[in-house]
Amino acid sequence: MAENAGELMQPALGVGIAASKTPNLTAARLRSLMTHAAFGLGLYLAARLTAALPGA
């Protein structure tokens, strides 16, 4: 989990906007894209599950 914190907080950790100051720019951006996609999918699935609950 700690290694993923860099992708979530890149600007705050000094690696620049969109990881522009990292040594391997493509890998950092792909990791960030995958992290954001997984988070978005989790939000979507949680919303669908919540909507399917009785009384929701």
Image (cartoon, rainbow, N blue to C red):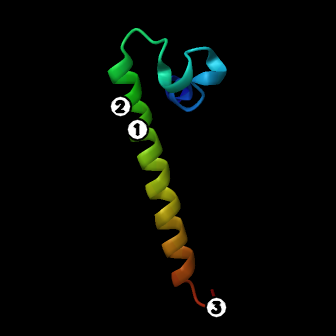
Q: Is 21 in front, or is 41?
A: 21
Which residue is the site of mark 3?
55
User: Is residue 4 positioned above or below 21 on the image?
Assistant: below
Q: Residue furthest top?
A: 23
Q: The disc labelled 3 sits on which kind of residue?
A: Gly
Residue drawn where x is 63% and y is 86% of the image? 56
Residue 39 horizontal side relative to residue 28, left or right: right
Residue at 48% x, 21% y: name it.
19
Nearer-the-camera pick, 5 or 13: 13
First in sequence: mark 1 vs mark 3: 1
Q: Check the image and report above or below for 13 versus 50.
A: above
Name the spot of residue 2 as percent of width and height, x first: 55, 25
Answer left or right for 36 relative to 15. Answer: left
Q: Which image quarter: residue 55?
A: bottom right
The Cα–Cα distance between marks 1 and 3, rounded to whole angstroms, is: 35 Å
The secondary structure type at the circle numbered 1 is: helix
Left or right: 48, with 29 as reference point: right
Q: Residue furthest bottom?
A: 55
Quarter of the image where one finds residue 35: top left
Disc 1 marks which amino acid? Answer: Leu
Residue 45, position in %: x, y?
Answer: 46, 66
Which residue is disc 1 drawn over? Answer: 33
Mark found first going from the N terminus, 2 or 3: 2
Identify the element where label 3 is drawn.
loop
